[in-house]
Image (cartoon, grey):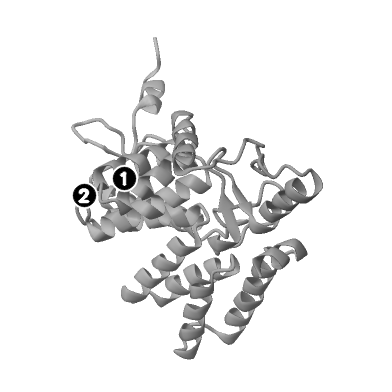
C-alpha cells in the first residue's frame, strides 16, 4: 500500500502556495506545457505571468536579426542577392533566382565561347531556355506539380493580379504549409496584404499583423518595414525603430529613410542611426561584384 505522503505528492498542487487538489478545493490548469496549476486565489496572477512570458518569448523571436534577407544568395556565385529584383532573373525551369551577373556571364559563355546560339540553357540546371510563353508555362506547371514552393507562390501572385483571389489564397497557403524559407516568407507577406485589402477573404487586421510578423521573422525586409509603420501608427515608436533598424541592416532603403525621419523627430539616437547606416551600406555593398556591376549598367 502507498503511504499517505506518497498520495499527496502525486496530487496536483498550486505552484504559488502549495494548496493540494483536495477537500473540495479545485485547481485550474493554466499551463498546458508543463501541467502547472493554481488555486482560485492565484489563478489570475499565474495566467498573467504566463501571458507575459509568452509575449517575451515572441518578441525575442520577432526582433532577432536575420543573417540574410529572405532572398538568400545567388546559387551560382553565392553572393547575397540584391533586394532590387531587377538585378536578378527567375528561372522558370528550376525556380532559382539567379543574379544578373551570372545570367549574363552564362549567355556570354554559350554564345561567344561555345557558339551555342540556338541552344542557350539555364545557368543553374542547364535545361534548354524556353522559346515561348507556352514553354515557360509548361516549366512552371512542372515545378508546381513537384510541390516547388517558389513556383506555387508565383502562381498565387499571378492569380491575385488576375483577380482570382480565392485561388491566390489557396496557393499562398500551400506555399506556407511546405515551409521552405524564402517562398514561405514571401507567401506570408502576400497574405498580409490580402488581409489588408480584404480581397477574396475579408479584412482582418489581426491576421495581417500575424502574417507580417511571420514574414519578418523569415527575413522579409518589406514586411519588417510594414510592421514598423504599423507600430508608428500605434504610437509604439521604440518597437517601430527596432523593426526599421533590422530591415535597414538587410539593405532596405525605405527603412533607412524611416530611421532618418525618426532621428529628426527624436525617436532614434544619432548613434543608433549611424550604426544602422553603416550596416545598411555594408549589406548593399555585399550584393555587388565586378560582374554584376558590369552587366547591370
At x 59%, y 68%, the residue is 251
Instruction: Looking at the picture, tell me which residue is in the foreground, 223 or 115.
Output: 115
Please state if 147 lies on the left or on the right of 99 as rendered: left
Label 1 Cα neighbours within 10 Å, binned few <14 / some 14-19 / many ≥20? many
Q: Position of residue 268 (x, y in %)?
A: 51, 82
Vertical side of 7 occupied by 92: above or below? below
Vertical side of 194 occupied by 125: above or below? above
Marks 1 and 2, the one that precedes in the sequence: 1
Please state if 295 lies on the left or on the right of 176 as rendered: right
Say whether marks 1 and 2 touch (CB < 8 Å). yes
Q: Quadrant of the C terminus?
A: bottom right
Whether residue 202 can be seen here: yes
At x 23%, y 56%, the residue is 204
Q: Quadrant of residue 194?
A: bottom left
Q: What distance separates the C-alpha of mark 1 from that of mark 2? A: 9 Å
At x 58%, y 44%, the residue is 96
Q: Quadrant of the N terminus?
A: top left
Q: Position of residue 224 (x, y in %)?
A: 46, 63
At x 21%, y 31%, the residue is 23
Please state if 41 lies on the left or on the right of 119 as rendered: left
Residue farthest to the right, as pictured: 113
Please state if 26 lies on the left or on the right of 277 as rendered: left
Q: Position of residue 142 (x, y in %)?
A: 48, 31
Q: Position of residue 83 (x, y in %)?
A: 56, 63
Whether residue 53 can be seen here: no
Instruction: Looking at the picture, tell me which residue is in the foreground, 216 or 77.
Output: 77
The label shown at residue 276 is none
Which residue position holds label 1? 168
The label shown at residue 200 is 2
Instruction: Looking at the picture, tell me which residue is in the foreground, 52 or 131.
Output: 131
Count of numbered marks: 2
Label 2 Cα neighbours within 10 Å, binned few <14 / some 14-19 / many ≥20? some
Amino acid at each position: 500500500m502507498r503511504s499517505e505522503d506518497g498520495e499527496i505528492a502525486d496530487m496536483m498542487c498550486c505552484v504559488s502556495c502549495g494548496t493540494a487538489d483536495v477537500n473540495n478545493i479545485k485547481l485550474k490548469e493554466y499551463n498546458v506545457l508543463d501541467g502547472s496549476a493554481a488555486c482560485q486565489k492565484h489563478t489570475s496572477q499565474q495566467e498573467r505571468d504566463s501571458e507575459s512570458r509568452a509575449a517575451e518569448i515572441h518578441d525575442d523571436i520577432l526582433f532577432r536579426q536575420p543573417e540574410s534577407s529572405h532572398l538568400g544568395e545567388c546559387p551560382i556565385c553565392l553572393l547575397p542577392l540584391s533586394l532590387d529584383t531587377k538585378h536578378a532573373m527567375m528561372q522558370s525551369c528550376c525556380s532559382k533566382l539567379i543574379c544578373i551577373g551570372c545570367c549574363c556571364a552564362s549567355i556570354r559563355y554559350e554564345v561567344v565561347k561555345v557558339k551555342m546560339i540556338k541552344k542557350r540553357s539555364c545557368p543553374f540546371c542547364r535545361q534548354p531556355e524556353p522559346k515561348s510563353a507556352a514553354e515557360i508555362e509548361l516549366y512552371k506547371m512542372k515545378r508546381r506539380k513537384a510541390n516547388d514552393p517558389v513556383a506555387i507562390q508565383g502562381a498565387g501572385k499571378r492569380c491575385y493580379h488576375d483577380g482570382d483571389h480565392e485561388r491566390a489564397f489557396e496557393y499562398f497557403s500551400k506555399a506556407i504549409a511546405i515551409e521552405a524559407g524564402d517562398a514561405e516568407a514571401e507567401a506570408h507577406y502576400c497574405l498580409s496584404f490580402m488581409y489588408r485589402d480584404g480581397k477574396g477573404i475579408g479584412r482582418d487586421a489581426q491576421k495581417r499583423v500575424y502574417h507580417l510578423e511571420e514574414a519578418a521573422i523569415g527575413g522579409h525586409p518589406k514586411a519588417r518595414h510594414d510592421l514598423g509603420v504599423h507600430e508608428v501608427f500605434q504610437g509604439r515608436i521604440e518597437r517601430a525603430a527596432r523593426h526599421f533598424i533590422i530591415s535597414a541592416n538587410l539593405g532596405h532603403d525605405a527603412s533607412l529613410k524611416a530611421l532618418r525621419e525618426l532621428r529628426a523627430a527624436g525617436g532614434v539616437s544619432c548613434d543608433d542611426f549611424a550604426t544602422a547606416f553603416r550596416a545598411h551600406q555594408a549589406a548593399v555593398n555585399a550584393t555587388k561584384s565586378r560582374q554584376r556591376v558590369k552587366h547591370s549598367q
